[in-house]
C-alpha cells in the first residue's frame, strides 16, 4: 500500500498502524501508553495525528493504514491537541519534579518541555492517594500515575503475575493491587518490569542509598561491594555513553572512591554457582532426583514458583544465587582471612535487579547474619557516583580485589538470558568427558527470544535444555512438568525478558536496541576472557581446596545452598 505522510509518499504493509509507518520513515510521534509488540490500547491519545479524508484526529498507535490515506503528524491542529492532552495530564499530576526520582528521565516531563507547557492551565481537584512503601523492592505513588496502563500490561501479559490492575472508575480510576492493598501483600514478584516500563515516577525501586551511605560512614564497619555481570555493560549509559559500553574497570574505581573498602566481582559467585549447579544436576541425573532441574538465581522467578507452583519446588536447584553465595563466603571465608568479625562486615550488592532487594531480606539466606546487607541497583549506583562528585568518564580502569575478584567468561554470561545454561553446559561437559567443550560458545540458547530450546550431546549423554525469560513463557513448561510431560532435563528461567541486561534496576529507557547492545557486550566480555569455563577459575579451585572441600559437600550445602517455601503469606 501507499500512504502519504506529511506530503511524503510511503509504502506500508496491510495491518500496520500509522505509528509503524511513521517510525520506519524516521518521523517522531510521541507515545505514552504504547508498548511495541503489544496490541494497542489507545488510551492516552498523545500520539494523535490528523487523517485528511475524514478530517479526524486519530491515535497513530491504534489506527490501521489504508490505501491512499493522507496523514499529517505535525499540523497546528495536531500540535494543539497534543498540548491540551499534556496540560490535562499535568492538571492531575503532583508538581513534584524537583524531588521526583524520575526527573530527567520522565516521559511526561520531556513532553511538557517539548510542547512548551509552562503553566498549570487547568486547575481543579487532583486525585489523592497514599504512597505504598511497604514492599522491600518497589514503591508506588498513585498520585503520579497517568493511567497509561503499561505496568498493568507488562505484569499481566509478559509476566502472567497480575499483581496490579485498574480499579475504580472515572475520576477515581487508579492502578493498584487488589482491594488497594500494599504491593507486599499480593503475589508481586518484585521483578521491577513495571518500574522499567512506567513513563513517570509512579513506580520506582525502593532506595537503599541511605543505609549504604550510613554504613560507609560508620568506622566500625568494613563495607564491601560486589558487582553483578549485567551492571558493567549498562552503568555507563547513565553518564551518556552508548548502550553496551563496557565499564568494568571504571565501576570498580567509582566504588572505591565512594568509600567501599573492597570491591569484588559477583562473576566469581557466578562461577561458583556453576560448579555447584552442574554438580547438583549430574547428581540428580545419576542418583534420581526431580528432573527437569530449574535454575534458582532469579529471585523474581523463585518468588513466582513459590506463589503459583509450590508443588514443583523440588525441581528448583537448591543453589543460592551468585551474589548470595558470594555474600555468604565474604562473611565466613574472607572475613576469617582478613581477621574481621562477620558482624562488622557489611556487604552491598550492586545489581541490575529490584527483586534482589527482596531476596537479600529472606530469612533463609544467611545464618547469624544476612549474607547480603543491602542491594543497590545500577541506577542507584549512578546516583551515588553523582552525589560523590565523581566524574565517571575520567575514572581509571581498576581491577577487582582478590580473592573473589577472579572470574571467567562463563561467569560473565550470567547477565544474558541463556547464559547460566551455557555456562553450566561448559562445566557439565568437563565433568562428563574430562575435556573442555571444543567450542565454548553455544548459539542455540543465545538471544532475546523468550523461549530457546536445544538438545546437547555430551559424551554418551543427551541433555534436553531450555532457556526461558519473561514469566509467561515458563507457565506452559511448568504445566508440562506437572502433567509428567516435560521433555527437558534442565531449564534456565529468568524473570525479566532478555535476562538481567533488562533487569528492573537498569538504566531507563530499556529499548530493544539497547538490550541487544548490552547483550552483545556480555558475550564480548566472554570472548575476550582468558578463561571461559567456571571450573578453570583458579580462585574458585583454591576456595574448594582451602575451605569448602568438595563441590556439593557438607560446607557447600551449609553456605551455598538454601531451601524454598510455599508462599501464601507473601
Ligand atoms: Fe497512542 Fe497512547 S500512545 S494512544
Image (spheres, rainbow, N blue to C red):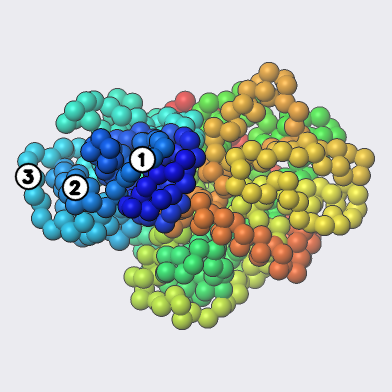
Q: Earlier in the sequence, mark 2 or mark 1?
A: 1
Between discs 2 and 3, the one toward the N terminus:
2
Identify residue for label 1: 69
Q: Residue at x 57, y 25 (%)?
A: 309
Up-down relation of residue 372 to residue 241 (above or below): above
Task: Please tell me whether mark 2 or mark 3 is closer to you in this view.
Answer: 2
For label 2, count other residues whose C-alpha is less than 10 Å away and answer few (under 14), some (14-19) or many (20+).
some
User: From the viewer's perspective, is 522 left or right of 486?
Assistant: left
For label 1, the crowd category at 10 Å Cα-Cα, with few meaning under 14, some 14 to 19 and many 20 or more, is some
State which quarter of the image contains the C terminus: top left
Question: Label 3 neighbourhood size at 10 Å, few (<14), some (14-19), many (20+)?
Answer: few
Distance of label 2 from label 1 (alpha carbons): 18 Å
Instruction: Identify residue for label 3.
Output: 123
Q: Answer yes or no: do the residues labelled 2 and 3 have beta carbons within 8 Å?
A: no
Q: Nearer the viewer, residue 301 or 540?
A: 301
Query: Residue 310: x percent and y percent?
Result: 58, 25
Q: Nearer the viewer, mark 3 or mark 1?
A: 1
Query: Where does the image place residue 422, in percent across and percent down from the top left?
Result: 73, 49
Farthest front residue? 68
Q: Quadrant of residue 280?
A: top right
Report the residue at 7% width, 45% height from top: 123
Residues under labels 2 and 3: Cα distance?
A: 23 Å
> Dividing the picture into quarters, in which one does residue 48 lie?
top left
CA distance for labels 3 and 1: 38 Å
Q: Is residue 255 above or below residue 506?
A: below
Q: Position of residue 83 (x, y in %)?
A: 18, 50
**Mark 2 = which residue?**
77
Amino acid at each position: 500500500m501507499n500512504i502519504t505522510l506529511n506530503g511524503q509518499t510511503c509504502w506500508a504493509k496491510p495491518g500496520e498502524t500509522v505509528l509503524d509507518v511513521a517510525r520506519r520513515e524516521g518521523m517522531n510521534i510521541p507515545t505514552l501508553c504504547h508498548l511495541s509488540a503489544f496490541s494497542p490500547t489507545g488510551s492516552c491519545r498523545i500520539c494523535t495525528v490528523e487523517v485528511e479524508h475524514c478530517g479526524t484526529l486519530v491515535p497513530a498507535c491504534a489506527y490501521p493504514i489504508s490505501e491512499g490515506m493522507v496523514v499529517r503528524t505535525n499540523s497546528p491542529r495536531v500540535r494543539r491537541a497534543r498540548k491540551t492532552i499534556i496540560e490535562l495530564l499535568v492538571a492531575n499530576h503532583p508538581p513534584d519534579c524537583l524531588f521526583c526520582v524520575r526527573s530527567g528521565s520522565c516521559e511526561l516531563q520531556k513532553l511538557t518541555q517539548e510542547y512548551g507547557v509552562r503553566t498549570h492551565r487547568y486547575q481543579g481537584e487532583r486525585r489523592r492517594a497514599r504512597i505504598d512503601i511497604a514492599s522491600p523492592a518497589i514503591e508506588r505513588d498513585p498520585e503520579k500515575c497517568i493511567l497509561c496502563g503499561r505496568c498493568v500490561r507488562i505484569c499481566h501479559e509478559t509476566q502472567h503475575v497480575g499483581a496490579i490492575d485498574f480499579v475504580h472508575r472515572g475520576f477515581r480510576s487508579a492502578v493498584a493491587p487488589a482491594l488497594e492493598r500494599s504491593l507486599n501483600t499480593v503475589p508481586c514478584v518484585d521483578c521491577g518490569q513495571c518500574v522499567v516500563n512506567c513513563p513517570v515516577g509512579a513506580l520506582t525501586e525502593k532506595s537503599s542509598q541511605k543505609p549504604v551511605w550510613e554504613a560507609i560512614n560508620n568506622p566500625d564497619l568494613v563495607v564491601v561491594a560486589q558487582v553483578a555481570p549485567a551492571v558493567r555493560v549498562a552503568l555507563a549509559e547513565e553518564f551518556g555513553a552508548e548502550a553496551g559500553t563496557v565499564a568494568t574497570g571504571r565501576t570498580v574505581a567509582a566504588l572505591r572512591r565512594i568509600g567501599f573498602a573492597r570491591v569484588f566481582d559477583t562473576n566469581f559467585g557466578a562461577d561458583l554457582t556453576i560448579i555447584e549447579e552442574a554438580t547438583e544436576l549430574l547428581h540428580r541425573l545419576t542418583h534420581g532426583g526431580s528432573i527437569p532441574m530449574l535454575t534458582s538465581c532469579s529471585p523474581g522467578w523463585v518468588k513466582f514458583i513459590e506463589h503459583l507452583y509450590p508443588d514443583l519446588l523440588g525441581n528448583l536447584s537448591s543453589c543460592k544465587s551468585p551474589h548470595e553465595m558470594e555474600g555468604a563466603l565474604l562473611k565466613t571465608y574472607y572475613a576469617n582471612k582478613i581477621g574481621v568479625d562477620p558482624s562488622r562486615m557489611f556487604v552491598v550488592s550492586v545489581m541490575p535487579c529490584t527483586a534482589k532487594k527482596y531476596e537479600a531480606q529472606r530469612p533463609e539466606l544467611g545464618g547469624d547474619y544476612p549474607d547480603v546487607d543491602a542491594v543497590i541497583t545500577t541506577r542507584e549506583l549512578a546516583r551515588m557516583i553523582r552525589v560523590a562528585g565523581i566524574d565517571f568518564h575520567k575514572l581509571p580502569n581498576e581491577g577487582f580485589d582478590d580473592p573473589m575478584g577472579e572470574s571467567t567468561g562463563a561467569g560473565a554470561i550470567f547477565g544474558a538470558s541463556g547464559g547460566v545454561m551455557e555456562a553450566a553446559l561448559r562445566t557439565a561437559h568437563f565433568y562428563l568427558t574430562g575435556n573442555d567443550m571444543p567450542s565454548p560458545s553455544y548459539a542455540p540458547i543465545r538471544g532475546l527470544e523468550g523461549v530457546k530450546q536445544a538438545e546437547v550431546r555430551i559424551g554418551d549423554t543427551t541433555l534436553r535444555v531450555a532457556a526461558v525469560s519473561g514469566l509467561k513463557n515458563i507457565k506452559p513448561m511448568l504445566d508440562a512438568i506437572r502433567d509428567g510431560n516435560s521433555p527437558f532435563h534442565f531449564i534456565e528461567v529468568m524473570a525479566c525478558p532478555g535476562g538481567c541486561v533488562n533487569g528492573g534496576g537498569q538504566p531507563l529507557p530499556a529499548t530493544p536496541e539497547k538490550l541487544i547492545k548490552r547483550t552483545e557486550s556480555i558475550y564480548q566480555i566472554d570472548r575476550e576472557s582468558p578463561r571461559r569455563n567456571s571450573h578453570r577459575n583458579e580462585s574458585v579451585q583454591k576456595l574448594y581446596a582451602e575451605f569448602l572441600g568438595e563441590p556439593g559437600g557438607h560446607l557447600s550445602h551449609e553456605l551455598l545452598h538454601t531451601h524454598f517455601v510455599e508462599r501464601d503469606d507473601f
